[in-house]
Image (cartoon, rainbow, N blue to C red):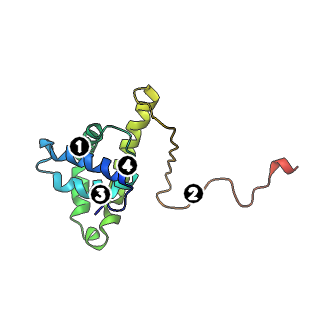
């Protein structure tokens, strides 16, 4: 269901990542924790890294955060709104993948075919509080 809302290319990428994850034997006891987070994060994962490499990052994320993810998954909050309960974990997964992409771009080990613009925000859904916009005067008009 998480793939239905995505553009076809991104859905195919996430599907390939999931296929790689299904073959990872280290997840046998924890795979039930993985897919709710991956589904919640899918829209924000850029299809830049090779799917096996992205899957490796997802496994590392799950290994580090399995207890917190399990707590969210088996909480009453998940029953009320599963997407909201998984949102903090999805954001962390997206951030981890984004950091890996940015690190590889900086080192020159990853080259993009076309230029991309990524915007990062710590506002977590709130309106940004930047010092421009209303109430500022245009200095060029002086």
Label drawn at residue 39? 3
Label drawn at residue 59? 1
Vertical position of residue 131 compared to residue 99: above or below? below
Q: Residue 36: give x, y in percent of width and height.
A: 25, 58
Q: Closer to the observer: label 4 or label 2?
A: 4
* Label 4 residue SS: loop
Q: Residue at x 22, y 53 (%)?
A: 34
Which residue does the numbered mark 2 point to in the structure image? 128
Question: On the picture, is 96 further left or further right than 71?
Answer: right
Q: Earlier in the sequence, mark 4 or mark 2?
A: 4
* Label 3 residue SS: helix
Pick the residue in front: 81 or 18: 18
Pick the residue in front: 77 or 42: 42
For the residues marked 2 and 1, what is the alpha-carbon distance in whole angstroms? 32 Å
Q: Quadrant of residue 107?
A: top left
Q: Closer to the observer: label 2 or label 1?
A: 1
């Amino acid at each position: 269901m998480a793939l239905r809302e995505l553009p076809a290319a991104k859905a195919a990428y996430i599907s390939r990542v999931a296929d790689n994850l299904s073959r990872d034997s280290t997840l046998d006891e924890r795979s039930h924790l993985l897919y709710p987070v991956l589904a919640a994060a899918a829209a924000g994962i850029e299809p830049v890294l090779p799917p096996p490499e992205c899957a490796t990052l997802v496994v590392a994320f799950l290994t580090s955060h399995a207890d917190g993810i399990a707590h969210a998954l088996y909480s009453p909050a998940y029953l009320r709104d599963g997407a909201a309960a998984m949102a903090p974990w999805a954001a962390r997964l997206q951030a981890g993948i984004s950091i890996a992409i940015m690190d590889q771009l900086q080192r020159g080990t990853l080259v993009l075919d076309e230029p991309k613009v990524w915007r990062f925000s710590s506002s977590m859904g709130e309106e940004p509080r930047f010092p421009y916009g209303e109430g500022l005067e245009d200095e060029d008009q002086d």
